[in-house]
Image: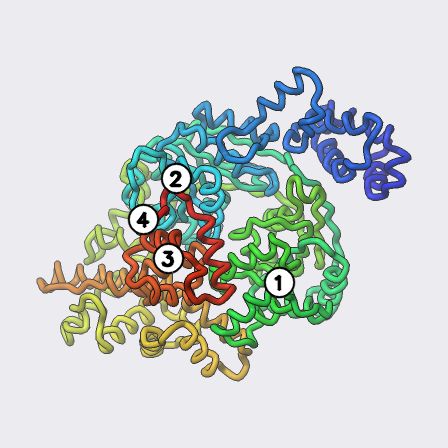
Amino acid sequence: MDLSLIRESLTQPEKLAEHRFPIFREVARLANDERTVAIARDLIIRLLSHRETFTDGYDALLDALVREVGLFPYTDQTKSEGLEDQILIEAHRVHGVGEERLFHSLQLSVFQELINGRNVVLSAPTSVGKSLVIDAVLATRKHKRAVIIVPTIALIDETRRRIASSLGSSHDIITHPSQARLDDGRPTVYILTQERALGRKDLGDVDFFVIDEFYKLDMRDDDDERAIDLNICFHRLAQQGAQFYLIGPNISSVSGLASDYKHVFIPSDFSTVALDVHHFNLKQRGEERATKLVELCSSLTSPTLVYCQSPRSAREAARTIHTGCNLPICDATKDAVTWLEQHYPSEWEVIQSLKRGVGIHHGNVPRAIQQYMVCAFEEHRINYLVCTSTIIEGVNTVAENVVIFDRRRNTKTIDDFTFRNIAGRAGRMNRYFIGKVFVLEEAVAEGDHMVNLPIEGQDLSTPLSLLLDLPQTSLSTGSKERLSTIFRDSKLSEATIRANRYLPIDVQNILFDAISGIYDRSPELLQWRGVPNSNQLRAVCELIYTHIDQGSSLRHHGIYDGNQLHAVLTSLMNAGDFKDFIRRRVRERWETRTVSDAVEDALAFLRKYVGYTFGRQLMAVSRIQADVLGRHKRSVPGDYSMYAAQADSLFMPAGLFALDEYGVPAEISLKMKRHWGAIEDVDHGLRLLASLNTEQIDLHPFERDLLNNVRRSLPPRAYSA
């Protein structure tokens, strides 16, 4: 029977009933041929969506086909017949991860490779269930110290929740820089970003590590700091002999992995869902795409993700959905909306869309609110979730439909790799057999994605920031000569240059001269510790803006010199809470900027600049002034580390601020501070949270729901009262 006729019949129940014998016969033939098993698997998944209609032995035949193509999680264990079937099922059973689950054949193959001590690089579609293998390996307790490297803090919390639910009673879980290892005899699992992994000093005995989305090791941009950090992280852990499991989708080949790692590369198209991709080939400009988006969202009744290229595009798409579809006020999000309106301007499109059941998820939305959006989507309180690249970097959620509204990421056209990564979010094993992908613009050109690790192939294009963190034994002869020249030609010590590897060497040398000049005129502007006075902060802000940032990031936040940076930081420190700071930024916005623009500009400044970039820049200045004053001026240097740490926590108590990662918004943490008093660190805050009776204190219903949700996600042993 022709494949096109089979696919057509699978969309029409009456035709399926009429042609079911020839369909099953052809699918069985395809399943028994290794060259066509992927086609058979796709058709079998489509048959599974009609499972309840099969009788008269066809249900048993379908179950046999399911086992034949390795889809054991879909098998009906109550209908398995004979000893051979039972043995097969038991061979695929997952042990030690809580609820009863079965591996499919690819998962079992990867699990066995890892248990046998081999390093594995797995490239497989998003829906394949790569994470279950991690949990199963950890459940064997074969490894005492494991690290899981994920690309975002959002994925840290998602992974923590998953592992805590299955292994929280047997493993210690560490996610935050301030958490110390317990060394209580139980295996330890670190869940970290690459930056956090590099910042820890207790990973020297790690014996197993995972890198999720390992394609980020590839350095397409020479100045990609995060890719450099990820490569250094991989090299450190692999060089100390730790077994590794690298996972990601849609990779055709990997180069640059040292041969002595003896890794197994497993590229697979094994999928647990089928995909229907619809192209509309609409123009980028004009109203056609907005009209089609409304048409689709009006007809789709199951959970739908909408991909947009930027936060602004996401806001516009969300507004298009709720106005174009004339969505009513959503009762399920009422508590969240009333709480958000207490802390943010009600005109913010995130609030207006959520009020009508449309979630918005992008990097400028506060992290805990992002987590709420995902939770509300998974619990069907909202049916639409509009995302940016967070759909592939921080959201692992369940949706039947994906609408690709833009075919760009920021301003660049997405490639085939990114397209397949986004499309792979449609469908989910055992919930949505067939994922539906709607591409509004023209199709993305097909292509292969290769990952190249730069450490093994060092040349003149290898970033210095990568070489500066590698041990001598890992450097090529040419790299050693490059570094030797840099150290010889600089007045800064080798230790300072290495510690400031994120800064170009010419910028470090310019800072040396600038700081020397300031010391000769006004040494008190540099010799501060703890919290600077106004003049000291202004001086360091001038150094940062003029020599380090050079406006590259600060201009995007409306800051055009060091004086402005000083003023904004001062206003943030003096603000009663973030609400005051945000409302001030809204009042002072340019006429061309909307309220939503101003709110998200303020949030982006807080999270991306103050909470991340500023502290790194300040510490670079601190190290160089310590070098200048200590080695060259024979004077007592300053120490800016305390103020940098305060900025990293947005000038909140660090233990309270860290709760945001677990799903507690900063506004609620500040409220809880009045109830709890001083918080020593994040573990102290989590212990207080675990023992909290939310019914006995005055909380908004939304606050109570969020706190209870976080409390349920905590491992009972670690944070029991």
Per the image, label 2 sits on a secondary structure element best described as: strand
In front: label 4 or label 1: 1
Residue type at mark 3: give it: Ala
Looking at the image, residue 687 lies above or below residue 364 = above
Please provide percent x and percent y for residue 165.
48, 42
Q: Which mark is residue 658?
A: 3
Neighbour class for label 4 at 10 Å: few (<14), some, many (≥20)? few
Pointer 2 local density, CA inside 10 Å: few below 14, some 14–19, many at least 20: many
Q: Is residue 69 visible?
A: no
Residue 80, disc: none
Q: Which badge, 1 or 3, comes first in the chain's sequence?
A: 1
Percent position of residue 59, x then y: 78, 29
Kindly report the distance in space between the C-alpha atoms of the residues bearing marks 1 and 2.
Answer: 36 Å
- The reply to whether dot 1 and dot 3 touch (C-beta < 8 Å) is no
Q: Secondary structure at mark 4?
A: loop
Q: CA distance from mark 4 to mark 2?
A: 12 Å
Residue 157 or 407: which is nearer the viewer? Answer: 157
Q: CA distance from mark 1 to mark 3?
A: 28 Å
How would you rate the neighbour count of disc 1 (Cα within 10 Å): few for under 14, some for 14-19, many for 20 or more?
some
Q: Residue furthest right?
A: 18
